[in-house]
Amino acid sequence: MTTASARAARVLRGPLAGLVVVTAAAAMGAAPMAHAAPRLPVSLADCGPGSLPETGLQGDVPAADRDSGRSTKGYRCNIKLLGGYTGHGGGITSTSHDDCAYMGSLFPGSMVGPDTGVAVVDAANPTHLRRSATLRAPALQAGTWESLKVNEKRKLLVGTAVPLLFGAGLLAVYDVSDCRRPRLLNGNGPGSLNSPLPITAHEGGFSPDGRTYWTSSVGPGLLSAVDLTHPSRPRVIAQALTGLESHGIGVSPDGKTLYLSHNFGGLSIYDISDVQRRRPNPQIRKLAKIDWTNGWATQHSVPVSYGRKQYLFTVLEGGSGGVKVINVTNRHRPREVNNLKLQVNLPRNQDRGLASSVGGGVFAYESHYCAADRQVDPTALACGWTSSGIRVFDVRDPLRVKEIAYYNPPARTNRHAELWNSPHALASVLGVPILSAPAILQSLAQGQFDPRQALSSRSGRVIGDLSTDWCFSPPEWRGNRLYVTCSDNGFQVLELTNGVYSAPPNQRSTVGS
């Protein structure tokens, strides 16, 4: 007879053993500055009429729901779906301009079939979305990873070639003045196959004025400033080697400070004023850094201000790190002042999170990309939270944040063959939630992880079944609507309901770069 403790031991020797190895490697790269995890999650949303609420912990999709098919109906609270365009999946991160969306491409699926590249979706009629164009610059056909961004001021769309984790050389610049029919500006110029740029990329983003596009790469850690004064002739004007401190970015409103995410836990602050002012021989100067062990794989930062205080909403894509609120009023002394987490992200719930997420993929319930509804005195923050879907928070007081709505799209369970542009479908060759490893190990070390609670009907699965979606992209604000893109369900238009949100008159969606 097999006892519960024996089965738990098998779990720890199986998929979890691999997680512990990964965690140990991550911990070796993290600086020894720990921050206490929040004792409570963000306040739960009060779901009104028309909702189809979660059945377990906040942010969790229980094993029973995955196995019974309940997760194929999705979950919603104070949000309704107006329309969707699935295509063949939504890539990793997507972006939007005006009433159009640009769906990120994923290699090698981005080079398969008649419509290779970035899909342009016309959302003028949100209940009848349609594909209006396909962008086929080589940089976009090679896969855009987390580089696809729009600068509203100059109406420019930029993406770099990132086939797998990082890429080099290729960058495409489009004019999106007519959002439905973008126009390639640097076709055979710098950044094309004829004239590659000396850049590496995993991610990228704009300075607010749109004159500079920054690329960063997880390896070898090269930060590059690409001048777009003449968008048909992009050129590299400054670079810095940053080592492992190289993931996503955020740029201050004046364009003089760059916040660079670490591949492990933390971020660095750089003075980029020489680049912003176009000084000869511009220097990129490191001012400060902040590290943590409560979460890793820092993703990007959204700079905002409340009164005279400057803050970052800094998103972590690993270790159940959630979203950190960092006071950067003094650029030389950044200070963590809050941490937004769902119930499923807390140390005491890592066992239950593992029980439900095994067999779902390398990601579980991790935050990934967020957008504030305005840069000055933001009132709401919307985030893609991977298997927890889209989460919307009231952030009028950054120290007292509460959840007001969520939408977790219907799972497309076992429909891998249809979704060759979905990173979820592609990554489902491995169903073990590796990105949760640090949080699981910390929970074990703190005595909060119960191996028996980590057992479920899914224990031991090593192949992903798409029993949730993965929502990676930042949900972008359009009044009381959100433009969102998830890996399996593609682009969707959502509307907040039940009076939980009123768009401020000067709303302007911002992802920080």
Image (tube, grey):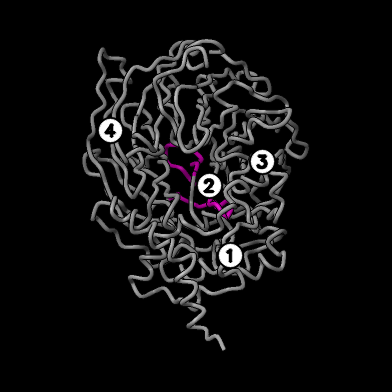
Residue drawn at x 58%, y 17% as measured from the top left: 175
**What's the distance in space between the residues labelled 3 and 4, CA to CA?**
38 Å
SS of the residue under disc 2: strand
What amino acid is found at the position of numbered circle 3 in the picture? Trp
Q: Is residue 493 above or below residue 354?
A: above
Question: Can you tell which of label 3 and label 4 is closer to the viewer?
Answer: 3
Label 4: which residue?
270
Q: Is the residue 365 above or below the residue 237 in the image?
A: below
Q: Nearer the viewer, residue 86 or 309?
A: 86
> Tag 4: residue type?
Tyr
Q: Secondary structure at mark 3?
A: loop
Q: Could you say where residue 330 lies in the image, as x and y percent from the top left?
A: 24, 40
Distance, label 4 to label 2, CA atoms, is: 26 Å
Q: Nearer the viewer, mark 4 or mark 1?
A: 1
- Which image quadrant is residue 438 in? bottom left
Residue 405 versus residue 492 in the image, above or below: below
- The mark closer to the camera, 4 or 2, is 4
Which quadrant of the figure contains the C terminus?
Answer: top left
* Spatial CA span between label 1 and label 3: 22 Å
**Quarter placement of the N terminus:** bottom right
Q: Residue at x 63, y 68 (%)?
A: 55
Percent across and percent down for residue 101 are 63, 32
